[in-house]
Image (cartoon, rainbow, N blue to C red):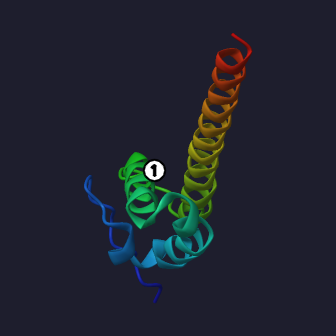
Amino acid sequence: MDQVPTPLSPRVRHGRHPELRDVAAQLHRDFDPITGAEAVDRVLDEVAARFADARVRTFLPLLVHRYARSELRSATLEASKAATDGANLGGVAARAASAG
């Protein structure tokens, strides 16, 4: 007989859920150096919690992976854009001070 997967609790810890272990490992491998493990864990838990009441669980790992990767990429792009904008503003201020 097929084994029925355990349901996700509202406060799922993705690493403890068998359906999401591979997803968690891949996202940690890709994003830990950029965002840190805590951010990856937080995003995974938030995304997995959205599907806590899902009746059809066949594509759950795929959906969690897709949405979590998208959120982590967005956060990474926003952080790098903010850092770039801050560096540009600092350069403009320095040029204005040296010109004045």
Q: Which residue is mark 1?
A: 47
Q: Quadrant of residue 94?
A: top right
In the image, taking residue 3 as reference, residue 10 lies left or right, namely: left
**Residue under the point 61% across and 39% down:** 83
Residue situated in front as seen by the camera: 5 or 81: 81
Count neighbours of disc 1 (C-alpha within 10 A) and say few if under 14, some if 14 to 19, many if 20 or more: many
Residue situated in front as seen by the camera: 14 or 87: 87
**The C terminus lies in quadrant:** top right
In the image, taking residue 93 as reference, residue 24 lies left or right, namely: left
**How far from the left and from the top, in percent, is residue 81?**
66, 36
**Residue under the point 41% across and 46% down:** 50
Task: Look at label 1 and name its amino acid.
Answer: Val
Q: Please, is residue 84 above or below residue 62 in the view?
A: above
**How far from the left and from the top, in percent, is residue 4?**
40, 77
**How far from the left and from the top, in percent, is residue 53?**
36, 50
**Residue under the point 45% across and 50% down:** 47
**How far from the left and from the top, in percent, is residue 23?**
55, 71
- The mark total stands at 1
Residue situated in front as seen by the camera: 27 or 23: 27
